[in-house]
Image (cartoon, helix red, strand yellow):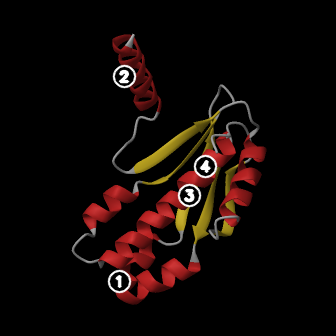
Amino acid sequence: MRKLLLVLLIFASLLVAQERKEHPLQYEEVIEGMDFEDVKLLLKTALDGRNMNVLGVVDVSTEKPRFSYMLVCNLSYAEKIFREFPQLGVMAPCRIYLYEREDGSVVVGFINVDTLLKVFKKDLSDQAKELFKKADQDVKSAIREVKGEL
């Protein structure tokens, strides 16, 4: 029975990993069964609830398939990081993109923070790295909330 349970857990893990094909440059989630505009509104609300300020929303395409991106920033995190490494302003605020697939599902993604930390590891203090990780978790948890996983 334990072996069967172990095989099922491994199989389930493989399915999840396959669904979340992570790319070194971005993190993505697919949200199904929800209209594009609803995803956008719920994501904005979930981000606001995590002190991630949505500074703007740019609707690139309002015709199907729709594409938008949000400019998002936690101002207290940004202030601490920019004092240490102002050049990161070229990537701030964080951009979260949303696009609609032909099947109606919505893809939500943003920069892969682990990759970002690898690139700038020599330029950032441990405190700044922790702030990046916290922001990463804030955005990911907001996306999971929209998906109904929280």
Q: Which residue is mark 4?
A: 143
Quadrant for residue 23, please give it: top left
- Mark 4 nearby-residue class (10 Å; few <14, some 14–19, many ≥20): many
Query: Residue at position x 74%, y 47% from top?
Result: 62
Task: Point out the image quarter for the C terminus.
Answer: top right
- Mark 1 nearby-residue class (10 Å; few <14, some 14–19, many ≥20): some
Mark 1 or 3, nearer chain start: 1
Cα distance between the residues tagged 1 and 3: 22 Å
Q: Is 15 rendered above or below residue 78?
A: above
Mark 2 or 4, nearer chain start: 2
Secondary structure of the residue carrying tag 3 is helix
Secondary structure of the residue carrying tag 2 is helix
The amino acid at mark 3 is: Val
Question: CB atoms at circles 4 and 3 under 8 Å apart?
Answer: yes
- Left or right for 57, reference 133: right
Q: Is 89 rendered above or below residue 136?
A: below
- Mark 3 nearby-residue class (10 Å; few <14, some 14–19, many ≥20): many
Q: Which residue is mark 2?
A: 10
